């Protein structure tokens, strides 16, 4: 997985990964995927909050 995935692509990869999870899935693979999803969610949340602040400041 590359850093150039957009949010929709990352979500699709996350859903596919969740469908294929099993007791044979290495814990490091799970941890890496959950970390990537959480980081992207944090970035998206921060961007949305920044946008809200900018909108409020303009009114």
Image (cartoon, rainbow, N blue to C red):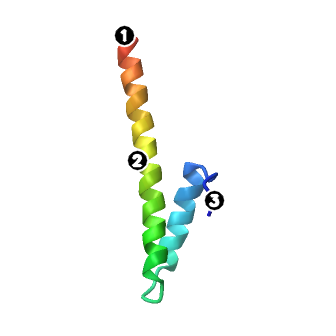
Looking at this rendering, what residue extends furthest in the bottom direction? 24
Q: Which mark's residue is nearer the viewer, 2 or 1?
A: 2
Q: Which residue is drawn at 43% across and 65% down?
A: 34
**Quadrant, the C terminus:** top left
Dots 2, 1 in contact, CB < 8 A: no
Q: Residue at x 47, y 89 (%)?
A: 24
- Disc 2 is placed on an element classified as helix
Q: Name the residue under label 2.
A: 42
Mark 1 nearby-residue class (10 Å; few <14, some 14–19, many ≥20): few
Q: Name the residue under label 1.
A: 59
Q: Name the residue under label 3.
A: 2
Q: Distance between the residues labelled 2 and 1?
A: 26 Å
Along the horizontal axis of the image, is 15 left or right of 2?
left
Q: Distance between the residues labelled 2 and 3?
A: 18 Å
Q: Which mark is residue 35?
A: none
- Disc 1 is placed on an element classified as loop
**In the rendered structure, which disc, 2 or 3, sits on the residue that comes first in sequence?**
3
Q: Which residue is drawn at 48% across and 67% down?
A: 33
**Quadrant, the N terminus:** bottom right
**In the rendered structure, which disc, 2 or 1, sits on the residue that comes first in sequence?**
2
Tell me the quarter of the picture where residue 54 sits. top left
**In the rendered structure, which disc, 1 or 3, sits on the residue that comes first in sequence?**
3
Q: Distance between the residues labelled 1 and 3?
A: 39 Å
């Amino acid at each position: 997985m590359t850093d150039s995935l957009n949010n929709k692509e990352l979500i699709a990869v996350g859903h596919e990964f969740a469908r294929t999870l099993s007791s044979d899935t290495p814990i490091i693979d799970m941890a890496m995927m959950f970390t990537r999803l959480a980081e992207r969610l944090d970035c998206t949340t921060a961007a949305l909050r920044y946008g809200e602040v900018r909108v409020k400041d303009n009114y």
